[in-house]
């Protein structure tokens, strides 16, 4: 049993660990996240300190908590709402959320924040999916034809799937991968992919079994989901893709127009 860690902080550690371990976000060397996520000894203050250094997740959770009237940004309802979506997510006023988020993050310089402008407000939602598909730069790079943008988008989003086989260190998870047809993003057919089920300290999901619904973040099984949680994650993923695709179609059409103009000038 984790010492001094409530459900929200445990949940945050499990979802935030993988990108942090890869060096993509949060503080360097936050070993406390791994220890807590695996159910080992830890202190709430360790997670609090680490969480505040996540330049994406923390402002979202702070704002979700404020708009929902919840005192703690690491309350389980807030953490679940941000990473996979829930009733708190659905109740937040999206227009107000987008405006407030623009005020907090839009002024930050750098490649990851420059896209958070008024133009992006129609896509805004209080979820990790919006940050991945909207704020991060990777959807703007899909038209290059390089595989990295799609790989990063598919890895960084939270994937929902079902365990179909297990080994001591991996789980084969049946889920729908992200696809791009040149104009729009969509979830493809079900496919089986291996995912890590453990890290150096142990497993985030104990007693993992075949047929369990799980969440996968950067190829790591980070959470066991019930039917409602899985359904909410599917809903918000689909919702975000529907809002993002009109922008992607416009980007591709603009690229075609530019190419035709170049040919005409030649």
Image (cartoon, helix red, strand yellow):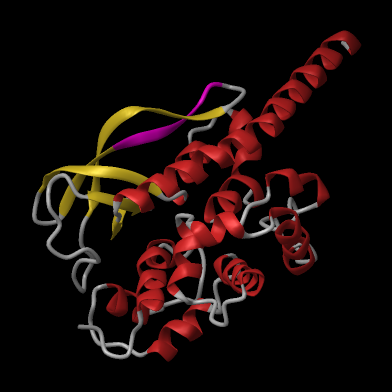
Q: Relative to the observer, which residue lies in front, 162 or 261?
A: 162
| Rendered location of residue 144, percent (x, y) | 61, 30
- Is residue 99 on the magenta stretch? no
- Which of the 4 quarters of the picture holds residue 122? top right
At horizontal 36% and vertical 34% (from top left) the residue drawn is 176
Image-based side of 33 in relation to 200, left or right: right
Residue 85: in sight, yes or no? yes
Which residues are drawn in magenta?
A: 175-181
Give the residue at the far right of this rendering.
265
Residue 171, image x, y percentages: 18, 48
- Hey, which quadrant is residue 22 in on the image? bottom left
Q: Image point 25% across, 66% down: which residue? A: 204
* 77 w.r.t. 85: above or below: below
Q: Based on the picture, tell me whether residue 180 belongs to the magenta stretch.
A: yes
Pick the quarter of the image with the N terminus.
bottom left
Q: Which quadrant is home to the C terminus? A: top right
Provide residue 17's location: percent of width, then percent of height. 38, 67
Q: Which quadrant would residue 57 be assigned to in this image? A: bottom right
In this rendering, is residue 80 above or below 242? below
Residue in the picture at 30% in, 43% down? 161
Residue 155 in view here: no
Q: Residue at x 34, y 85 (%)?
A: 5
């Amino acid at each position: 049993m984790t010492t001094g860690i409530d459900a929200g902080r445990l949940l945050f550690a499990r979802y935030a660990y993988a990108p942090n371990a890869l060096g993509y976000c949060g503080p360097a060397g936050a070993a406390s996240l791994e220890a807590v996520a695996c159910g080992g000894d830890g202190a709430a203050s360790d997670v609090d300190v680490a969480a505040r250094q996540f330049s994406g997740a923390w402002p979202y959770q702070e704002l979700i908590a404020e708009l929902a009237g919840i005192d703690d940004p690491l309350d389980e309802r807030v953490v679940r709402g941000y990473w996979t979506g829930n009733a708190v997510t659905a109740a937040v006023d999206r227009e107000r959320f987008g405006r407030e988020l623009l005020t907090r993050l839009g002024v930050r310089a750098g490649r990851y924040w420059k896209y958070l402008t008024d133009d992006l407000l129609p896509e805004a939602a209080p979820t990790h999916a919006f940050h991945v598909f909207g704020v991060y730069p990777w959807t703007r790079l899909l038209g290059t034809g390089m595989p990295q943008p799609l790989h990063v988008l598919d890895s960084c989003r939270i994937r929902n799937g079902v365990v179909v086989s297990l080994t001591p260190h991996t789980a084969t998870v049946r889920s729908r991968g992200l696809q791009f047809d040149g104009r729009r993003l969509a979830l493809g057919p079900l496919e089986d992919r291996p995912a890590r089920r453990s890290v150096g300290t142990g497993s985030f999901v104990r007693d993992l079994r075949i047929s369990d619904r799980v969440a996968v973040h950067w190829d790591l099984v980070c959470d066991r989901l019930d039917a409602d949680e899985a359904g909410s994650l599917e809903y918000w993923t689909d919702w975000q893709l529907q809002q993002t695709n009109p922008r992607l179609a416009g980007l591709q059409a603009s690229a075609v127009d530019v190419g035709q103009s170049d040919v005409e000038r030649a």
